[in-house]
């Protein structure tokens, strides 16, 4: 692509699993792929594969998106190196078996599974507008059913207490903390905030979220109930491969048929509704106001 300006794609969580496949496939489309990694050495294999087998480019920015300073530093680095962004895939995520706090005092599911992606999107707003970008948030269908074992009974959608939305540190409190439900709530907040961003972007940028299916990645090992962990090897054989999980993400990011589609939530390729609270405009706006204040350096 000598002499041509490459389209820019930012992909978080690209050093392993499904994120690696997403980054590699975007590079195969000739894109300049930017990722943020706490340990750049983890990206060396991907760097080599992209250099050797694609016409694309991988750029690795050292950073940690689990706290405000890391999000801000990563966004600043990206803005300084690129004039516009065409694709942003917020793929990074984590599940924690016990309650932990980020350096900012935010519960870690909220920090990593919600704030990292939302913060990066917000701080890259001007560059996303210039690229008329597609933002793809990798969520989890736990937001529609937060039960860890789903064999019996009715789905139990993730919830958010609107009285806690004025203080991010109040979300996923210690009292009654259940790790799987905390993870589901953080993914729900990603969708809630995404719906608000759709109005903010006004059509200049599309914002969609999806559950890619149950993919055989490291996070799934963490999500398997303790009683079933001896069977993880067997369970993995029935899960999607990273390539299969990446396919619906790439569809939202690159398929011309998805041009202009925004404000949707997909389970793989199927457009579905999210819990009623996610469409509550007051909840959306209160979450956005609190999060924006936090990202700008104000109180939590």
Image (spheres, rainbow, N blue to C red):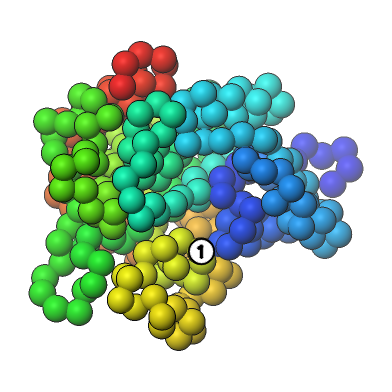
Up the image or down, 277 lies above or below 181; here it is above
Q: How many marks?
A: 1
Kindly identify the residue that appears in the image at 34 percent across and 78 percent down.
228
In the rendered image, the quadrant that contains the C terminus is: top left
Question: Camera-side residue: 256 or 197?
Answer: 197
Q: Quadrant of residue 273?
A: bottom left
- Name which residue lies at 34% across and 32% down: 106
Query: In terms of image quadrants, where is residue 29?
Result: bottom right
Q: From the viewer's perspective, tell me whether residue 191 is left or right of residue 38.
A: left
Where does residue 60 sit, x and y in percent of width and height? 71, 40
Asked where in the image residue 167 lies, by quadrant, the reply is top left
| 115 over 251 or under it: above or below | above
Mark 1 surroundings within 10 Å by alpha-carbon count, few (fewer than 14), some (14 through 19), many (20 or more): few
Residue shown at the point (27%, 49%) measured from the top left = 182
Assign a secondary structure to mark 1. Answer: helix
In the image, 164: left or right of 13? left
Q: In percent of the image, x 61 and y 58: which residue is there?
A: 16
| Residue 31 in the image, given as x and y percentages of width and height | 71, 47
Residue situated furthest right in the rendering = 2
Q: Relative to 17, is 182 on the left or the right?
A: left
**Residue 74: percent from the left, percent from the top?**
59, 29
Above or below 169: residue 142? below
- Residue 243 horizontal/vertical position (percent): 58, 70
> What residue is disc 1 on?
218
Q: Is residue 32 visible?
A: no
Q: Is residue 44 visible?
A: yes
């Amino acid at each position: 692509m000598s002499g041509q300006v490459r389209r820019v794609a930012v992909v978080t969580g690209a050093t392993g699993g499904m994120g690696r496949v997403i980054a590699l496939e975007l590079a195969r489309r000739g894109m300049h792929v930017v990722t943020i990694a706490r340990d750049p050495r983890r990206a060396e294999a991907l760097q080599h594969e992209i250099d050797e087998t694609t016409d694309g480019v991988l750029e690795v920015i050292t950073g940690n998106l689990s706290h405000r300073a890391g999000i801000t530093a990563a966004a600043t680095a990206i803005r300084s190196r690129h004039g516009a962004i065409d694709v942003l895939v917020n793929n990074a995520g984590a599940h924690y078996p016990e309650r932990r706090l980020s350096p900012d005092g935010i519960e870690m599911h909220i920090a990593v599974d919600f704030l990292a992606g939302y913060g990066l999107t917000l701080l890259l707003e001007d560059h996303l507008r210039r690229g008329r970008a597609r933002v793809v948030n990798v969520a989890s269908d736990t937001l529609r059913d937060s039960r860890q074992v789903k064999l019996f009974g009715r789905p139990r959608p993730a919830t958010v207490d609107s009285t806690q939305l004025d203080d991010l540190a109040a979300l996923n409190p210690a009292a009654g903390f259940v790790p799987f439900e905390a993870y589901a709530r953080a993914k729900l907040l990603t969708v809630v905030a995404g719906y608000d961003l759709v109005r903010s972007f006004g059509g200049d940028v599309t914002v969609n979220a999806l559950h890619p299916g149950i993919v055989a990645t490291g996070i799934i090992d963490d999500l398997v109930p303790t009683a079933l962990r001896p069977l993880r090897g067997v369970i993995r054989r029935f899960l999607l491969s990273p390539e299969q999980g990446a396919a619906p993400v790439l569809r939202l990011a690159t398929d011309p048929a998805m041009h202009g589609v925004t404000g949707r939530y997909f389970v793989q390729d199927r457009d579905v509704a999210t819990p009623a609270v996610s469409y509550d405009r007051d909840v959306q706006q209160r979450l956005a106001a609190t999060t924006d204040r936090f990202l700008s350096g104000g109180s939590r």
